[in-house]
Every structure is written in C-alpha cells, then in structure tokens.
Amino acid sequence: MQIVANAPRQRSAAGNLRHPTRAAWRRRGIFPTMNRPQLQLVVTASCTLCDEALAWLASMPDAAGHTLVTIEVTEDDATFDRYAHRVPVLIVGNAEHDWPFDAKAVSNTLNAG
C-alpha cells in the first residue's frame, strides 16, 4: 500500500477544493491503480486513534496495492464540518467507515471495487 500524505488539491474557478487531477498525481510520481479504489483516511494531528487506524490498514492484506491518501480534517471547513467528531474515518469510493473499522465490511468494500 502506497501512503500519500496531504495529496495535492486544486481550487475550482469558484474557489472550492477539488480532488487532485491525474496530472498532479503524475507530477508526484503516484499512479493509482485503475481497478482499485483509492483509500482516503481522514485524520488529525496528535491523534493516537489515527495512528492505530493507519497501522491497522497497513497490516490488512486486502489493502495491499491500494493507494492511501491521508486528509487532514482541518484542511477545509467542509471536511471539518463533516468529519471533525468522527476522526479517523476511512473513505473508499462512496463508502465511509468509522473507527474502529469492521474488518469484514472494509474487506467487502475493497473487493467490490
């Protein structure tokens, strides 16, 4: 599993944050696998639960081959409003998993992609 901290973000014409473009990923030498969903872990600084979640994901065999992007919950207001009281949160596609993660549910989500 490749871990990317604070993935590059761009602002749209309206000033809203967007997900990174493929060109931004290529500039950083990151090539997400097309058939595997990207894992996003919403974290915050000095969070022992976030450290545990990261270690849990690193030890999970089904997460191998996926790219993991950590997102700082204080990065923008929308992220903070949605996840501040739930950190850490694992996002895979449209699925969100709150800590403590259910291994079977996360595995099913990863294998469904």
Image (cartoon, grey):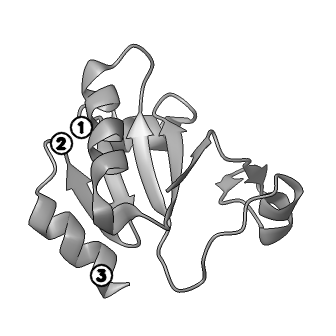
Q: In front here: 79 or 108?
A: 108
Task: Give the secondary structure at mark 3.
Answer: helix
- Sequence-earlier tag: 2 or 1: 1
Q: Residue at x 33, y 52 (%)?
A: 90
> Residue 105 at what x, y percent from top left?
14, 68
Q: Amino acid at mark 1?
A: Arg
Q: Residue at x 65, y 60 (%)?
A: 19
- Sequence-earlier tag: 3 or 2: 2
Can residue 13 be seen in this snapshot? no
Residue 26, which numbered label? none
Q: Say if mark 2 contacts mark 1, CB within 8 Å.
A: yes
Q: What is the C-alpha distance between the residues marked 3 and 2?
A: 19 Å
72 sits left or right of 33 in the view = left
The residue that disc 1 covers is 86
Neighbor class of circle 2 (other Cα within 10 Å; few <14, some 14-19, many 20+) is some
The residue that disc 3 covers is 111
- Sequence-earlier tag: 3 or 1: 1
When the figure is inspected, residue 39 is found, relative to residue 52, above or below; the finding is below
When the figure is inspected, residue 48 is found, relative to residue 62, above or below; the finding is above
Task: Give the secondary structure at mark 1.
Answer: loop
70 sits left or right of 107 in the view = right
Q: Quadrant of residue 32?
A: bottom right
Q: Residue at x 38, y 84 (%)?
A: 113
Q: What is the C-alpha distance between the residues marked 2 and 1?
A: 8 Å
The residue that disc 2 covers is 99
Q: Amino acid at mark 2?
A: Trp
